[in-house]
Amino acid sequence: MDFLIEITLLVILAIILLKIYHRAKRSAMAPSNNRRYLSSQDITKNMTLYTSTKTQVEVDSKTLAFKKPTGNPLVLMMAWLMAKQKHLKKYAQIYTEMGFDVMVVHITPWQLLWPAKGTQVVAAETLRFLENNKSYEPIVMHGFSVGAYQLGEIMLQMSRDMDRYGSILDRFVCQIWDSAADITEIPVGVPKSIFPRNERMESALRNYMLYHLKTFHNQATIHYMRSSQMFHSTLVKAPALFFVSENDPIGPPSSNHAVREDWERANIKVTFKCWERSQHAAHYIRHREEYLQMLFQHLEACGVLEAIGVPKRAKL
């Protein structure tokens, strides 16, 4: 009976991954808008550069170093799962209009399920990019949902060689966390991200996720736990701004408050905004003016805007 259950769950997973592939393919083929103000360029299959310049950046494929630096500061943006390009562009454009480049790091559900061959490979690529593009300074961290887990994987790799990566940490001047999700929300968040309007498929995937966490403890769950512990202890000590909402089951206030308490005990300044009603990884869409006001206040308080020469009147 257990064997039949496993086979059934694996078949369901195969169907789900096939649907994800076709959805991603359609998204990649969709026409790109707003090219007047924003251009995008794939640096790797998991890293996309958004910039206000129209010139394509030449990249060394091995080191990920730009052959000619853009001269702009950087936002390292950790995307939510299954994020669409048109939505990521809305966030990227906030920063590109101030003169930032935005490097978006995005992972697939498969990469999340199998960290050793997925998210940890992406983490290594991200570190390689940051290490070999030293001109990117200051750096702003802006993460969403499962991006908190991905940063944890990056910091775990940093922690193994601080002599090498310590200078990267010094370049981070502030961080923004939008709907950050912890390990306890993985069985809730992954199905909702992939099947937001299909309760039957969402339930099937949730059952598989619970099975996956239990069955593949050494291959997956232990990595989620270590990343979560690293995110709570964090190597990035820059002031942080959290956006959450009471009705968000994927990135609830409770788990974000736990992070906040750990960070404040480590003398990290934390600003916390919690709406009564909003939407996971879409607070900017639901509360645009308030979101932007708090974001710019945070950037200003951290000295980012002054450092890059953005006058107050140009922020909005």
Image (cartoon, rainbow, N blue to C red):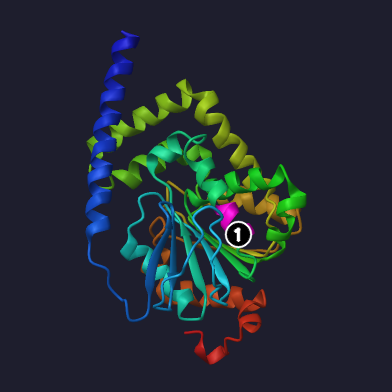
Residue at image position (62%, 79%) is 300
Residue at image position (33%, 81%) is 36
Count neighbours of disc 1 (C-alpha within 10 A) and say few if under 14, some if 14 to 19, many if 20 or more.
Answer: many
As drawn, 276 above or below 112: below
Q: Secondary structure at mark 1?
A: helix
**Residue situated in front as seen by the camera: 22 or 147:** 22
x, y percent for residue 248: 42, 51
- Quadrant in which the N terminus appears: top left
Q: Is residue 286 visible?
A: no
Q: Residue 169 colored magenta?
A: no
Residue at image position (57%, 89%) is 312
As drawn, 9 above or below 146: above
Provide the residue span drawn in magenta: 126-131
The three-letter amino acid code for the residue at tag 1 is Leu
As drawn, 214 above or below 243: above
x, y percent for residue 12: 26, 28
Residue at image position (74%, 55%) is 166
**Residue situated in front as seen by the camera: 257 or 299:** 299
x, y percent for residue 70: 53, 75
**Main secondary-structure element of the magenta-colored stretch:** helix
**Residue situated in front as seen by the camera: 166 or 2:** 166
Q: Looking at this rendering, what residue extends furthest in the top direction?
A: 1
Instruction: Determine which residue is flagged by label 1.
Output: 130
x, y percent for residue 139: 61, 67
Q: How many marks?
A: 1
